[in-house]
Image (cartoon, rainbow, N blue to C red):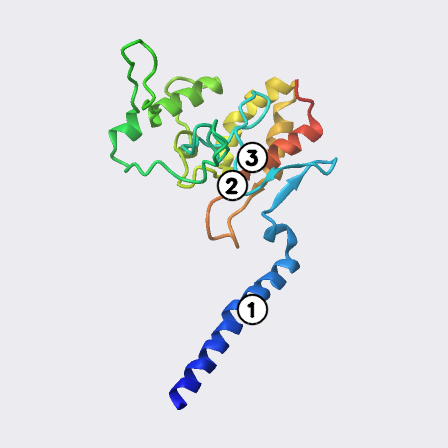
Amino acid sequence: MKQLRSAILLTLFFTVFTGLAFPYSLYAIGKLMPRQANGSLIKNAKGDLIGSELIAQPFSKPEYFHPRPSGTGDLGYGTFDKDHSYAGSSGTNLGPTSDKLINGIHKKTADGKDDPSNFDGIKDLADAYRKENNLAKDALVPADAATRSASGIDPDISPENANLQAPRVAAARHMHLDDVTHLIEENTQQRFIGVFGDPAVNVLRLNLALDKVGKAL
């Protein structure tokens, strides 16, 4: 009976602690930080939900800054695919010496169409980035401009990446380049306590700042 009583008491304790006290404590803490607890959601001036500062979006128009490449799903960036299934978050799982990762795969099917298994490698992504931003064919580009993140939904780019895109954005919006680079500086997050991580620019917040001061044409 003594052992049975101990077992019953421990079961009740852990049921209350792990099933009630702990989750409700986390819920209460979340109420103190509603923005973070609800996914760091971002709304426009009208109050419409336009995204999260934690998840990248596939900007592609020349008047906007573009995020780093994504290998997630058919559309990328954790979006819904053509079958309305959420693609989720993932990387390529390719090692740094992989020929596929570096050079990609470019094949044709018997009818001359692109093979569904085709894959753009780092060299392809770097060439596309140079062409998109009117850079020289041999120009060095930041690593995050030509590599996919481990999550596939990285919302940030490096300041170097943003500054290389700035002339394209400024030209598309008929803005002075200095005004665009100033917005990049204002939206650059520095290293945590000056030591951890690298400076980063949140693409969605930077594009929102652009829309406030420069008309998209």
Task: Please tell me which of labels 2 and 1 falls first in the chain.
Answer: 1
Q: CA distance from mark 1 to mark 3?
A: 39 Å
Residue type at mark 1 is Leu
Provide the residue designation for mark 3: 203
Q: Secondary structure at mark 2?
A: strand
Q: Quadrant of residue 212?
A: top right
Q: Is residue 165 above or below residue 56?
A: above
| Label drawn at residue 20 | 1
Is residue 70 rendered to the left or right of residue 105? right
Q: CA distance from mark 2 to mark 3?
A: 9 Å
Task: Rate crowding at label 1 as few (under 14), some (14 to 19) or many (20 or more) other CA atoms within 10 Å.
Answer: few
Residue projecting furthest to the right = 46
| Label drawn at residue 127 | none
Task: Rate crowding at label 3 as few (under 14), some (14 to 19) or many (20 or more) other CA atoms within 10 Å.
Answer: many
Q: Quadrant of the C terminus?
A: top right
Mark 2 or 1, which is nearer the eye?
1
| Label drawn at residue 200 | 2
Would residue 182 be visible to someone looking at this image?
no
Please provide percent x and percent y for residue 52: 58, 41
Q: CA distance from mark 2 to mark 1?
A: 39 Å
Mark 3 and mark 2 in contact (Cβ < 8 Å)?
no
Is residue 191 rendered to the left or right of residue 128? right
